[in-house]
Structure formats: structure tokens, C-alpha cells
Image (tube, grey):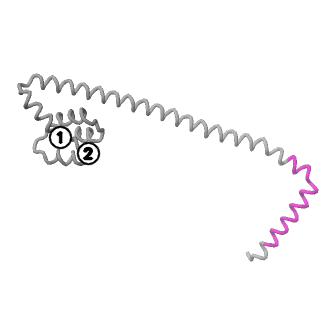
């Protein structure tokens, strides 16, 4: 369709709309007032839906945080249990105190640098004692990333 025809149709619609608004203003007001109620119902339902969804999300986030804290507590308890077992094993093995101190000192020196330096030093070791490395890291700095990496290497 030609643009001029479209312009004429648009102008005609404007004239008819203005004429009907003036002549039928009472009906137009009733039409607008009649549409307000359903519009408010739709907007209210939309708001209730959005807010209830957000409420559900907040509850699930709280549950996830609680679950995460429980997992951390369980991990800490298992690490303590492992440490106690290591201490029992060390007490049962007949090593001289000086040998034990030397091994602990060597492992303390291995983990005293940055995480990357410690990882490189462990990789260069022939047969590292991961339990002693973990114990040394827990005593010295307790960095989670290095502890997790050592646990994975141990497996």
C-alpha cells in the first residue's frame, strides 16, 4: 500500500476518534472505568507471583547456606578425626624424636611459601608424605586451596 494512503487512513482515524470522544464521552469514561478493575487484578496477580517466587528463592538460598555449613562442619570433624588417627599412628611407629622433627621441619619448609611454590615443591618430591604435608599446612597457614589440592593428590 502506498504511504500516502496510509497517511490518509491514519488522519481519518484521528478525526473519527476525536469526534467519537466528544460525542460519546460518557461511554468512553465508562469503558475506561470498566477496564480499571481487571487491570488492577492483573497487576496484583503479577506482583503476587513475582514476590512469591522471590520468597521461594530466598528460602532455598538459606537452605543451601545451612547445608553448606553442615558440610563444612562435617569436613572439619573428619579432618580432626584424621589428625587424631595420624597422631596415634605416629605414636605407634618407633621413630626417634629427631627424625620426626626433621620430617616435620622439611614439610613445614615446603609449605611455607606461596601456594604455587608449595605445589611445585611437592611435585618435585619423589615420594611425599601427603598426611605430613597436610598436617604441616594446617599447623602453619591452613590455606584451603592448598589443603584441598593436597587431599586430591593424596587420593
Vertical placement of residue 23 versus 92, above or below: below
Q: Which mark is residue 109?
A: 1
Dividing the image into 4 quarters, which one contains the N terminus?
A: bottom right
Quarter-of-image position of residue 3:
bottom right
Q: Position of residue 53 (x, y in %)?
A: 57, 38
User: Which one is in front, 101 or 19?
Assistant: 101
- Residue at the disc numbered 2: 115
Name the residue at 56% across, 38% down.
54
Total numbered labels = 2
Magenta span: helix, strand or loop, mainly? helix
Q: Position of residue 11 (x, y in %)?
A: 83, 69
Residue 41 is inside the magenta segment:
no
Is 6 on the left or on the right of 59, as rendered?
right
Quarter-of-image position of residue 75:
top left
Which is more foreground, mark 2 or mark 1? 1
SS state under label 1: helix
SS state under label 2: helix
Name the residue at 26% across, 45% down.
115
Please provide the residue range marked out in magenta: 7-30
Amino acid at each position: 500500500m502506498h504511504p500516502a494512503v496510509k497517511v490518509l487512513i491514519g488522519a481519518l482515524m484521528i478525526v473519527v476518534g476525536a469526534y467519537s470522544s466528544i460525542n460519546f464521552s460518557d461511554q468512553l469514561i465508562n469503558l475506561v472505568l470498566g477496564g480499571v478493575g481487571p487491570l488492577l487484578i492483573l497487576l496484583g496477580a503479577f506482583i503476587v507471583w513475582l514476590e512469591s517466587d522471590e520468597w521461594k528463592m530466598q528460602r532455598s538460598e538459606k537452605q543451601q547456606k545451612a547445608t553448606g555449613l553442615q558440610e563444612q562442619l562435617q569436613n572439619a570433624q573428619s579432618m580432626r578425626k584424621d589428625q587424631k588417627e595420624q597422631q596415634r599412628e605416629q605414636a605407634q611407629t618407633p621413630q626417634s624424636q629427631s627424625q620426626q622433627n626433621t620430617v616435620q621441619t622439611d614439610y613445614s619448609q615446603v609449605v611455607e611459601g606461596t601456594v604455587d611454590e608449595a605445589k611445585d615443591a611437592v611435585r618435585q618430591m619423589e615420594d611425599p608424605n601427603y598426611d605430613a604435608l597436610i598436617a604441616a599446612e594446617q599447623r602453619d597457614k591452613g590455606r584451603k586451596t592448598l589443603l584441598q589440592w593436597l587431599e586430591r593428590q593424596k587420593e
